[in-house]
Amino acid sequence: MSTPSYTLQDIAFGVGGSPGSPTGGVWGKLSQRNDLLALGVYQWIQDAILELSRNYRFEYLEKTGPQFNLTIGQVAYPINNWLQAGDAGKQTNLIPSITRFFNNIVVPGQVNPCSTLLWKTVDALELMFQSPGVPTYFTRYGGQILLAPQPSSALPVFMRYQIEHPFSNPPVAGDLFYLDNEWKEIAEYAAALRGATNLRMMDYAAQYHTTLFGDPEFQRSSGGRGMPGLIFRRITQMEGDSESMPKQIKPMVARLS
């Protein structure tokens, strides 16, 4: 699986473009202004992509952490325990799943049943932290992963997680764009929306907000009516695969009065 090969310069000034010879991108969406570099266009793009990768799953940012055994009676585990060594200290944006095995030892070639834990708020789990049992729920709180009930056995666990999109600090032209290819256009519009807001180009900002999130009716109805935006219409590969799977249909029959 090859990683998308766009750079922030591609997003800002079009694929193959540059500040001195732009071809599109954010530049084309903000009236072809020639001062975008000085105004901080790469920062707009970084902020836009960070927000997108905080709210949606992207396969190029997701990883599977190491397997380790829980400690009997220990509820809280530092999040670095769950991450690959190279990701220690990085921001973990999303936790799609935590898997727990039912037997203490995982032997290659032997069956060991497992299941994924369910997320709940820390308040909902408060009482279960005091009760020993097989962990069934998790939450993230204060830089730690908390499990409930309190582990009564040293069961093996691992986590699938999504890291924050990697950028230089501050972002530079050569920083790579790690989102799916179909999100490149969304990144351009999201960065242009931020730029238009900063530049007081409010007609552009309103237009690009609608382009991204749908018209007001679509937003008010939570997708029930109106015209959807680009974000709604773009789906990740994982969601696309699930859309193509057969689904059970439950017929509904109105009761005769």
Image (cartoon, rainbow, N blue to C red):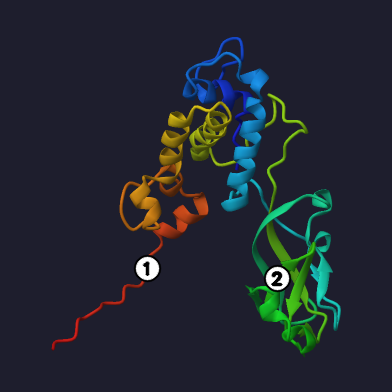
Tell me, for residue 139, which label it has, or none: 2
Q: Nearer the viewer, mark 1 or mark 2?
A: 2
Q: Position of residue 53 (x, y in %)?
A: 61, 47
Residue 104, placed above or below residue 236: below
In which image quadrant can residue 82 be found?
A: bottom right
Left or right of 215? Residue 162 is right
Seen at 69% across and 25% down, the residue is: 174
Q: Secondary structure at mark 1?
A: loop
Question: As displayed, is residue 175 above or below residue 36?
Answer: below
Residue positioned most to the left: 257
Residue 12 visible within the image? yes
Q: In the image, is residue 150 above or below residue 157? A: below
Task: From the top left corner, tell me how far across and down residue 231 is, in percent.
Answer: 46, 45
User: The C terminus is located in which quarter?
Assistant: bottom left
Q: CA distance from mark 1 to mark 2?
A: 30 Å
- Where does label 1 land, which residue? 247
Q: Position of residue 11 (x, y in %)?
A: 57, 27
Local crowd at mark 1 within 10 Å, few (<14), some, or many (≥20)? few
Q: Earlier in the sequence, mark 1 or mark 2?
A: 2
Tally of marks: 2
Q: Give the number of the disc on residue 227.
A: none
Can see residue 2? no
Q: Is residue 126 left or right of residue 34?
A: right
Disc 2, SS = strand
Is residue 2 depicted above or below 123 in this figure?
above
Residue at image location 60% in from the left, 43% down from the top: 1
Along the viewing direction, whichever of 50 and 81 lies nearer the viewer: 50
Task: Say which residue appears at 35% left-offset and 72% top-offset.
Answer: 248
Query: Tag 1: residue type?
Result: Lys
The amino acid type, in three-letter code, at marker 2 is Thr
Q: Residue 88's x, y, as percent?
A: 83, 52
